[in-house]
Image (spheres, coloured by chain):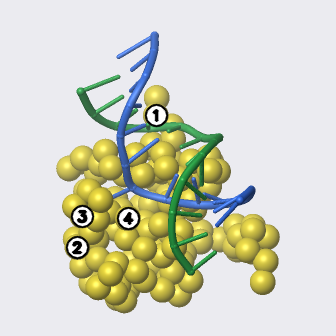
Chain colours: A yellow, B blue, C green
Amino acid sequence: MDRFRQAVLRVVRSVPPGRVVTYGQVALLAGRPGAARAVGAVLRGLQEADGDVPWQRVVNAGGGISTYKVGHGELQAALLRAEGVAVSPTGSLPLERHRWWPDDALEALDRERHPT
DNA sequence: ACGTTGACGTCAG
DNA sequence: TCTGACGCCAACG
């Protein structure tokens, strides 16, 4: 019973086109704060059957593509550009400009962690 | 069943 | 700013 895996896929599937979230965010939304790395493990194990999971919308906390390590960097960049996200040749993108949150409550939570 | 890896994030130097 | 250490935990062998 891989609850976490299901939760991760549910969260990622809920991210709208043209918007992005970070691994840490997905972990948080999946109910396991701090398990960002585990999110990567889940996404890494995606199969054909999971074709409806927009994994390209998941980026690292620095607003960069982390999939170059697995050879999917160019693909992810291309998929994101196709959704209107400006990805630089080096694989970085304007995170705060595209970051997505499911609702305002969590947005407030994030503000707590990133005081201006 | 168990040890290792790593699509990450954060903090101390 | 940059680097290294550490915690996290699903996948994989």
The disc label shown at residue A72, or none:
3
Question: Hey, what amino acid is under mark 1?
Answer: Asp
Asked if both marks, 2 and 1, belong to the same chain, the answer given is yes
| Mark 2 closeness class: few <14, some 14–19, many ≥20 residues within 10 Å | some
Check disc 2 and report the residue beneath it.
A74
**Is residue A54 shown to the viewer in this render?**
no
Q: Hey, what amino acid is under mark 4?
A: Ser
Mark 2 → mark 4, Cα distance in angstroms: 11 Å
Residue A95 visible from this viewpoint: yes
- Kindly report which numbered mark, 1 or 4, lies closer to the viewer in this rendering: 4
Q: Residue at x 27, y 69 (%)?
A: A73
Q: In terms of sequence position, does the residue under pointer 2 or pointer 4 come before the other?
A: 4
Q: Position of residue A91 (x, y in %)?
A: 34, 78
Give whichever of discs 1 and 3 has the lower sequence position.
Answer: 1
Residue A58, image quadrant: bottom left
Quick one: A22 or A84, which is closer to the camera? Answer: A22
- The alpha-carbon separation of the residues under discs 1 and 4 comes to 24 Å
